[in-house]
Amino acid sequence: MPIVAQNPMARVYSRFMYALCIAFALLIIGVLVLIIGYLVSIGWRSVSVSFFTENPQPYGSGRYPGGMLNGLVGTSVLLAVSGVVGIPIGILAGVYLSEYSANSKLAAPVRFVSDVLAGVPSIVVGILGYELLVVPLGGYNGWAGALALAFIMIPIVTRTTEEMLRLVPKSYREASVALGATKARTILRVVIPAATGGLVTGIMLALARVAGETAPLLFTALGTRLLTVNPNQPFPSLTKQIYNYATGPYKEQKELAWAGILVLISLILVLNVAIRLLSQRRGAR
Amino acid sequence: MTTTDIPVNLTGNPLPAPAARRRSRGQWVDRIVHRLAAGSGVIVLLMMAALVSVLFYAAAPSIKTFGLKFFTETSWRPNALEKIKRTPEGKIIRDADGEAVVDTIPPVFGALPVIYGTAVSSAIALLFAVPMSLGTAMFLIRIAPAKLAGPVSFLVEFLAAIPSIAFGLWGLFVLAPFLQSHVEPSLNAGFGAIPGLRWLHYDGMPTGRDMLAGGLVLGIMVLPIITAVSRDVLRAVPQTQIEGTLALGATWWQSCREMLRYSRSGLFGAVMLGLARAAGETMAVTMVIGNVNQVVASPLAPAQTMASLLANQFAEADGGLHRSALLQVALILLLMSLAFNVVARALVVGKQPTVTQ
């Protein structure tokens, strides 16, 4: 390493790079503030009571442009179904990696694959959903959308579950086994309760991530203007409704899209702050 | 797993089975939990297998038809073309009845434009995001006091939580008009005027919905992941290493450069993770890149990425070759992002680089 600290230029250069690093950090935060600020300031004007109570109305109808009740309900149902499928599988796979991996040849591949799966582009997951659940069932449907979201959730939940369970001290497990508990009882009554906060964090992280997904729903749930809770048909979602309105021709619909984004980001912000508070409380204990 | 039959199994050594074994309820629960956990692990493996095999199977007709030409063909034409046959002199050839002879040109699909669009927009994204992310990571580790580093990290990571469609909306209604009216006209004039940069000039009015806009939005979107991973990688540089450089009289930046060198493979992994994210990103890019299937050198030209092509055409594609070709694009996208992720994982999780001096 050629060191030329005596060279005054090196000192000036160092000062410059120091300032540049600070500038970059400020710039990133500036970009964040700019984007959020813009979304909030525009979206705020368009949010009204009817956004939450009415369905989208076609151009020209009396109550045009309506709201996004269908999207709110649709996204909630999709999240619920994908959670029911994805969370247990993700947690069990995480338990497997953390608790049963000692003598298992399966653990290393599972860990590797779940790591890599987390990086698969979400649109590809949507296409898999189309091939496996839309073509055979004969049409776009909510199940396909929910399962595509579950597909995205599983690796996230698996990875956080494994990490959180590994934080539980080994002595807890030893104490439980020494008292005569079986391995399953140890996991269910000692290890998982000790890591509950972390597991909830992982679940909420995964929910926050899939709540904002659009690409996997394009060819699975498809979306509809109508309010429905029947997953056998094309199924509405907040994000798809926002996408349709943002890329559509009408000004009023674009305003609704901004309002939708504001509601979506607020939801995700609430989830994120909750995650942060939860993990802090865990740290304090 | 035979060891499940045994109640105490922490050591991994199977205990001798009791002579008269009666399965208690606890043992049944034990087996069920083990089976469920292992089954879920298998499900994770099956998910990956399904992804790769289904895409391969569905893309097979296209792979068979086009072979390697798929990567070099520049047109993407889902409909057959009918063209009137002409002699080399340009005269229309007529058959015995006096009807013009028509050549039917079959549909053709090539992935070069979308691969090019993906590569250029990802490259612009990295050009923008890598210096910013490394600078911010350095800031978090070597400049910011702990009280400041926490909130800054949180804000950067919150950027990662914003849904892609929100970036798309912002890019479409804020960034694109801004680029169109304030940046691109002078940038394009500059490209045209400077001799060496002539090839970057766009012969047309830049619309703000082009590879530059797509690249910038992608750059913003990959900032958090590159920052977070490189922060963790840089944090793993031993304190003695930093102190050593300072003791030798290095300036602040010179010691930072040593840190960057020390952890270069991990940082490369961080960039690969960002690249994987940028290449697979769909909604935001679809909304700002212009969606024109072409290979044009200028970053001010509209383009199409693999993901945006899928988003735009997959739902409308009829069965047969068009859909199969789209699936082949999806397959290429999948394999590419798998490769990036595998390399990144090996570099970030793998062993720390050894000191070279």
Image (cartoon, coloured by chain):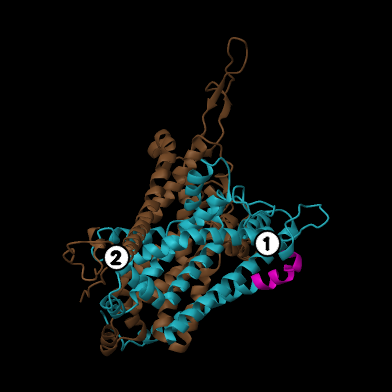
Quadrant for the C terminus of chain B in the image: bottom left
Is B45 part of what is drawn in magenta? no
Among the 4 quarters of the image, the one containing residue A5? bottom left
Give the residue at x 53% y 36%. B319
A49 is within the stretch colored magenta: yes
* Of residues A54 and B64, the one drawn nearer to the viewer in this rendering: A54
* Residue B250, horizontal then vertical, whole percent: 30, 86
From the image, which quarter does the N terminus of chain B lie in? bottom left
Residue, disc 2: A100
Disc 2: which chain?
A
Name the element at disc 2: loop
Q: What's the residue at 59%, 59% (across, down)?
A: A77
As measured in the structure, the alpha-carbon distance from the residue carrying label 2 to the one carrying label 1 is 47 Å
- Give the residues drawn in magenta, as a range: A39-51
**Residue visible at 33% across and 82% down in the picture:** B254
**Amino acid tagged 1:** Ala
Residue type (three-letter) at the residue carrying disc 2:
Tyr
Direction from residue B161 to residue B343 in the image, left or right: left
Rendered location of residue A88, percent (x, y):
44, 62
Observer able to see residue B67 = yes
Residue B41 left/right relative to B114: left
Disc 1 element = helix
Q: Which chain is cyan?
A: A
Chain ID at mark 1: A
Q: Main secondary structure of the magenta part?
A: helix
Kindly indicate which chain is depicted in brown in the rendered structure: B
| For marks 2 and 1 on the same chain, the one whose residue lies earlier in the sequence | 2
Tag 2: Cα neighbours inside 10 Å, few (<14), some, or many (≥20)?
many
Q: Which residue is mark 1?
A: A257
Percent x, y for residue A194?
39, 78
